[in-house]
Image (tube, helix red, strand yellow):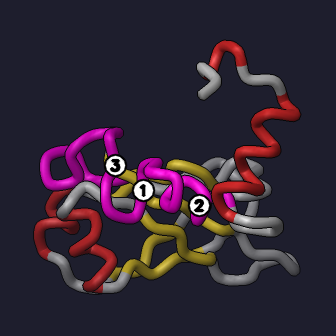
Amino acid sequence: MLKSSDMTRKDFLKAVVACAGAGAAVGALLTACGGTDQSSQNLQGSCRDNGAKNGLITGNHGHSLTVPAADVLAGAAKTYSIQGTSTHPHFITIQADQFAVLAQNGSFTVTSTNDEGHTHNVTVTCA
């Protein structure tokens, strides 16, 4: 077996195809090969203690998200603005079952509302 420091790009691509088959999603590859599934484990922090934030917002241009720890503990569906410093708003809704994922320090991705002809995928992670 190659050590990661000895692995070439070609070796890596061979391992990807061997592990998950052609066209597999990166998340599926990580799970199938024993990597971390961020939907069930997040090493960023404790959502119960610190709340949550956006880990990644696709196509971001100033949007941001902060979820207070109290909202994670309450566990009730809630809608948040992700406008941040952007000139236009978007909103996301976190459902009760998604708050349960956060309470276990997991993460998930939701799609924002459409504004100015586009949406954003928002990955919510523990702060």
Task: Compare residues 80 and 105 and report the one nearer the observer.
Answer: 105
Circle 2 Cα neighbour tier, 10 Å, few/some/many (<14 / 14–19 / ≥20): some
Q: Magenta segment: does it hold 112? A: no
Q: Which mark is residue 38?
A: 1
Residue on which disc 2 sits: 27
Q: Amino acid at mark 1?
A: Gln
Image position, residue 74 (x, y; %): 12, 74
- Quarter of the image where the C terminus is located: top left
In the image, what residue occupies the spot 77% across and 56% down? 17
Determine which quarter of the picture holds residue 77. Answer: bottom left
Mark 1 or mark 2: whose residue is earlier in sequence: 2
Mark 1 touches mark 2? (CB < 8 Å):
yes
Task: Compare residues 66 and 56 and report the one nearer the observer.
Answer: 56
Quote the CA–CA distance across marks 1 and 3. Answer: 5 Å
Is 75 on the left-hand or right-hand side of 37? left
In the image, what residue occupies the spot 53% across and 69% down? 109
Is 61 on the left-hand or right-hand side of 45? right
Is 43 on the left-hand or right-hand side of 48? right
Q: The residue tagged with tag 1: helix, strand or loop?
A: loop
Mark 3 or mark 2: whose residue is earlier in sequence: 2
Image position, residue 86 (x, y; %): 71, 54
Residue 89 lies, with reference to residue 68, above or below; the image says below
Quote the CA–CA distance across marks 3 and 2. Answer: 14 Å
Magenta region, residue range: 26-52
Q: Amino acid at mark 2?
A: Gly
Mark 1 touches mark 3? (CB < 8 Å):
yes
In the image, what residue occupies the spot 60% across and 51% down? 56
Q: Which mark is residue 42?
A: 3
Task: Compare residues 47 and 116 and report the one nearer the observer.
Answer: 47
